[in-house]
Amino acid sequence: MEKLVLDFKIDYALDWLCGVSIKQLRDDLDAIEKLGATHVDIESNVYYDCANTEINAISTRVETVEECNERIEKERRFNASRELLELNELKRLQEKYKL
């Protein structure tokens, strides 16, 4: 199975909403880059006429072999569980309708 590209939020406060100096921007960008950030995600939302903006430092990378194997195993267990549920439901319906 092919490895996925994953995004991880970096725990760093980017307090840029009410205006920020260029020096502060540069300092913040340097700091988050040292923490592994590859981009900044700026998302605006409106909830019940109240505007909200969220700014996060994000690190994007290809998942490791361990992460890939863990994801595949988790997906395999989920599919096996789902198949068991479906087979039980099929059995129940066959008994109910005497098929």
Image: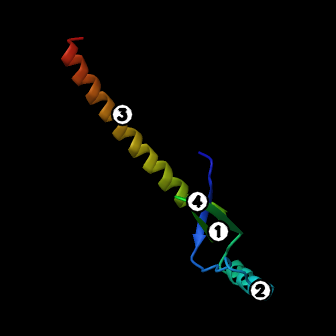
Nearer the observer: mark 4 or 3; the answer is 4
Nearer the observer: mark 1 or 3; the answer is 1
Percent x, y of residue 32: 68, 79
As measured in the structure, the alpha-carbon distance from the residue carrying label 4 to the one carrying label 3 is: 40 Å
Q: Earlier in the sequence, mark 4 or mark 1?
A: 4
Nearer the observer: mark 2 or 3; the answer is 2
The numbered mark at residue 83 is 3
The residue that label 2 is drawn on is 21
Residue 28 lies, with reference to residue 47, above or below; the image says: below
Query: Label 2 near label 4: C-beta < 8 Å?
Result: no
Percent x, y of residue 83: 36, 33
The residue that label 4 is drawn on is 46
Query: Which amino acid type is marked by label 4?
Result: Val
The quadrant the N terminus occupies is top right
As measured in the structure, the alpha-carbon distance from the residue carrying label 1 to the one carrying label 3 is: 36 Å
The numbered mark at residue 58 is 1
The quadrant the C terminus occupies is top left
The local secondary structure at tag 2 comes to: loop
Q: Residues within 10 Å of mark 4 (few under 14, many from 20)?
A: few
Nearer the observer: mark 4 or 2; the answer is 4
Nearer the observer: mark 2 or 1; the answer is 2
